[in-house]
Amino acid sequence: MSKSSWLVAAVCLSFSAINASGQLPQFVKLVERASPSVVNISATRSTPRHGDQFNNEQLPDFFRRFIPPQQAPRPAMGSGFIISSDGYILTNNHVVEGADEIIVALSDRREREAELIGADPLSDLALLKIDAENLPTVEIGSSEELKVGEWVVAIGSPFGFELSVTQGIVSAKGRSLHYERDNYVPFIQTDVAINPGNSGGPLFNLDGDVVGINSQIFTRSGGYMGLSFAIPIDVAMEVVQQLKDKGSVSRGWLGVGIQRVDRDLAEAYGLDRPSGALVSEVFTDSPAESAGLQVGDIIVEFDGKLIDLSSDLPHVVGRTRAETEVKVLIVRDSKRKTLLVKVGARDEDDVAVRSSSSVPGNLIGIEVQDLALEDRNRLGVDKGVLVRRVSAGPGREAGIRQGDVITTIDSQWVNNSDEFETLIVGLEENVAVPIRIVRNQRPQFLVIKIIR
């Protein structure tokens, strides 16, 4: 027998053994119990959004035969689930956003027009209400107790195929999607097959409890590619309560710009490993400024919660009630320090804003110039020096580019090119030093090391 034949036989034997021992889960009873509480949602808009309609030309011929030619805008399709017997339904905000009419189709084929109680774009959640009683409801579980590797099941309406069931496992927890403007949701990542129409549908654990709301996929083709993201049910139910009470959601606000701490930054700040959130910007008149947080601080703990990844901080701060006083543990100058911060309320309208002589920075291989007034206005900075040229050397290796504005070197502010030259000359050999730059009006830290 060939090597490949032995491999096939071994795999088949392995699956046979698993089936015989009953280790593979059965989803039949879960689906029978849970599916009556899952609904299909149609949202009609007078002005359709990009992506609301299916592109028939991208569908396989087999499926294209079952979809009629589109003569008029089709309703946006999505999923949802009933959380209370008197008709409250949870779904994604992007399913119903801007809708003139929302129709909910129950599992028994009854249809009801739904009222939008409230929506929260930042968490992509919306709460609906239909006029009905004694409806079947889901069991709400705990996303906090969910473990990576657990089996999970999604029920929804991909491409309009109602009550479709898919399964997979939890791939990761606490994911931040970096293409999102605000990372307030610690997404559950799964490999459950999710497609357009699944949005807003429930994600169940094997006990039949809802642990998440299917929200997004990562795709280059427009369809499922193995990466699906669900909103944790613990986060969702906090949002639901606020939407019920006042129709909107308020979040905690700290007022800092942050970046991840990599290995080089950890070395430069005297950390034993990369962890925490590095403060790259402190907003004016913010809770952070009032508490004494400074650019270059590394936040390692917030209100008793460990900040291991920088993406953990927005999740924790956002779930903290405004006006709450919390302890924030930081690392400053390689020493740990605790600050008391009074968390503010996030303003939904807030947006994180933010004669020259050439001086050669030969020691690190870059040339800089003083900032002219028009440079300060154009680049959104009030201190620093503008990088004119980057040659081979430590500066290029650190990631500095032409057009960057260098604002601090080793926690020392740089006001002009003379100060820049003085600080560069004073750098020690073979010592990793943090340099703060502003690129495209966004501050970040790089690490530079002089090797003589």
Image: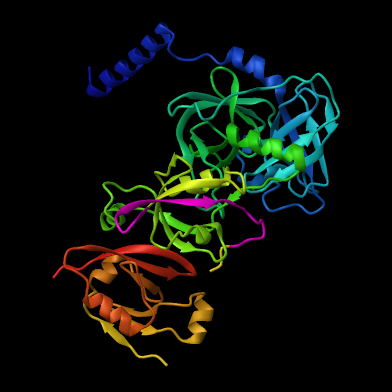
Q: List the single residue furthest toward the left.
A: 452
* Front residue of this view, candidates 39 and 284: 284
* Depicted 31 relative to depicted 362: above or below: above
Whole-percent x and y of residue 242? 70, 39
Q: Is residue 97 magenta?
A: no
* Front residue of this view, candidates 241 and 229: 241
Can residue 336 be seen by looking at this rendering? yes
Colour scheme of the picture? rainbow
User: Where are the magenta residues, as a range?
Assistant: 331-351
Q: In the rendered image, which quarter contains the N terminus? A: top left
Whole-percent x and y of residue 38? 70, 26
How many discs appear? 0
Q: Is residue 346 left or right of residue 299?
A: right
Can residue 199 be seen by looking at this rendering? no
Whole-percent x and y of residue 438? 43, 70
Q: Is residue 309 left or right of residue 7?
A: right
